[in-house]
Image: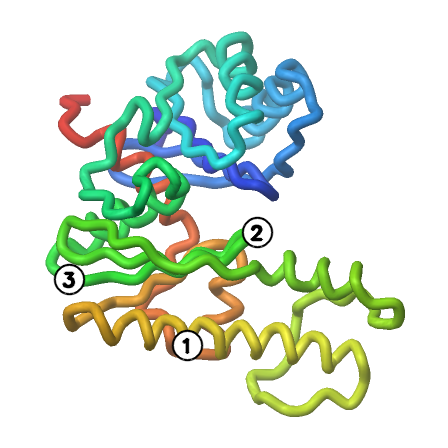
Amino acid sequence: MQPKLLLFDIGNTSVKLGFANRDRVLASYSLPTDTGQTADSFGLTLLSVLRHAGVDANALTACVASSVVPVFDPLLREALTRYVGKPLYYAPGDLAIPLRNLYRPPAEVGADRLVSAFAARRIYPDAPSLIVVDFGTAVTFDCIRAEEYLGGLIFPGPLTAINALSRETAKLPRVNLVINTTEFVPGRDTSTSIRHGLVFGFVCVVEGLAARLARDLPDPCPILGTGGFAPAIARLSNVFDRVLPNLLLDGLRRLYYDGRES
């Protein structure tokens, strides 16, 4: 099925691209957030992604973006103008997010958090409250009650933590965060100690903070996980009611089609 939307989730570490139609997100890709590249280099990369996905740019209707990297925005706009030729809409600037934003000041909350909160509410329209845990450069915990965005928590993300540990210590190695067990045991070597400390540490962080947030929210309160590290947490804990890797992209899709005939 031919996609109609090209979606962009522009984060501090990566740019997640998605292709969607009215019904769902069809495919996604992840590229590094390189603010030093030119509009031409990003535009040519976009053409390569379009070719790989088998998408005809002429058949697209629009592009929709959420960004927490303002310096990247003019680069994206120029690349799309030259290489895709479809209108670009930003959320919430061009597409209003229909949640009452209780953040103070409201403009300080990241667009990504609001879009994901909106998507969660549309997926669970009858839940009295929701918590969205998003793993990126930072881990964010966002609380939704009825049609209100209440705010949440911000915590360093797994890669941010491991980069800081490697940078600030002389003898600790840089390791990946892949573990081959679901059992929490003390590490018997330095690499395992770091892996288990960080991975199971994040499990405890998510379980503990989500439980504390949920205490003050109406029941039932589904807890949704999204972002790159969410599946790893779900493998080790039942804290999430559901893992939705493309939650933000789905929110952009829903925002664009809300109230549109086609």
Q: CA distance from mark 2 to mark 1?
A: 19 Å
Q: Position of residue 33 (x, y in %)?
A: 62, 35
Mark 2 surroundings within 10 Å by alpha-carbon count, few (fewer than 14), some (14 through 19), many (20 or more): some
Which residue is depicted at the point 66% across and 68% down? 177
Which residue is depicted at the point 39% across and 18% down? 88
Give the amino acid at mark 1: Glu
* Element type at mark 1: helix
Tag shown at residue 207 = 1
Give the amino acid at mark 2: Thr
Place residue 4 in its image quadrant. top left
Q: CA distance from mark 1 to mark 3?
A: 20 Å
Q: CA distance from mark 3 to mark 2?
A: 28 Å
Viewer-side residue, 1 vs 125: 125
- What residue is shown with label 2? 137
- What residue is shown with label 3? 127
Q: In this view, which residue lies farthest toward the front?
A: 105
Q: How many marks?
A: 3
Q: Position of residue 97 (x, y in %)?
A: 24, 36
Tag shown at residue 11 = none
Give the amino acid at mark 3: Ala
Q: Position of residue 198 (x, y in %)?
A: 63, 73
Would residue 181 be found to the left or right of residue 136 on screen? Answer: right
Q: In this view, which residue lies farthest toward the left?
A: 126
Mark 3 surroundings within 10 Å by alpha-carbon count, few (fewer than 14), some (14 through 19), many (20 or more): some
Q: Earlier in the sequence, mark 1 or mark 3?
A: 3
